[in-house]
Amino acid sequence: MYGQARFTPETEDGHPTEPNWAYGVSKLANEKYAAIMGEAHGLSVTSLRYGIVYGPREWYGRVLTIFLKRALEDQALVIFGDGEQVRDFVYVGDVVRMHDACLTANGAASGQVFNVSSEKGLTVNQLADLVVEVTDRRVPVIHEDVPEGAVSSLFERRRLPQELRTLVQSRRKAETRLGWEPETDMADGLEREWRWLVANRHRWTVMAY
């Protein structure tokens, strides 16, 4: 939605919306279509801009899920590039609470755009270290210099083109208007996802992205 960060945390009304790849463009288009339909037909529309939503039942293909599955299989965690890419992770249970807050806000969310995020940046290097700590699998962490758009030589993942360097979204608007803030610490949420994966390893067999 925002494209490469001009500043952080990225705010709903202050940061440019200049997505630099097709997926982001589709998100922005959906938001604009919804706003037009809301105005034309008197619909109550609220648009949510998610950070990286994680937790039990997450789809398999993003960096966190790949790290977890490789840890489960006692394989090295592979980081593309220098690992200093920054991401904003938000636990799925907190996202559900945000949905509830929008639905029960007596119109305070209508016509609004909200980030749903932790507002805490975590580098991929830090994420890998946290996965090793939470899973207690002492697997090595290695770096691979994979060009954007190319496939890893170590496993089946392709590095995404036009990769974002930084994503850290402000949650202040949601807190001010709806009283919402995330409650789940990253380590706690990661442990819950890990326990789910250990019990449901059959769920992550085909990578999708």
Image (tube, rainbow, N blue to C red):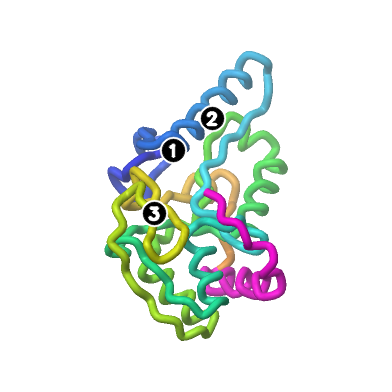
Q: Position of residue 112 (x, y in %)?
A: 55, 33
118 displayed left or right of 142: right
Q: CA distance from mark 3 to mark 1?
A: 25 Å
Q: Residues within 10 Å of mark 2 (few under 14, many from 20)?
A: some
| Label 3 or label 1, whichever comes before in sequence order | 1
Say if residue 11 shows up in the picture: yes
Secondary element under disc 2, as helix, strand or loop, is: helix
Q: Which amino acid type is shown beneath numbered disc 3?
A: Val
Kindly indicate whether the residue at mark 2 contacts the one at mark 1 (C-beta within 8 angstroms).
Answer: yes
Whether residue 194 appears in magenta in the rendering, the answer is yes
Give me the residue at 65% from left, 64% from top: 56
| Label 1 or label 2, whichever comes before in sequence order | 1
Name the magenta segment's main secondary structure: helix
Q: CA distance from mark 3 to mark 2?
A: 32 Å
- Looking at the rendered image, the quarter that the N terminus falls into is top left
Q: Which residue is mark 1?
A: 1
Q: Which amino acid type is shown beneath numbered disc 2?
A: Glu
Q: Is residue 189 above or below residue 168?
A: below
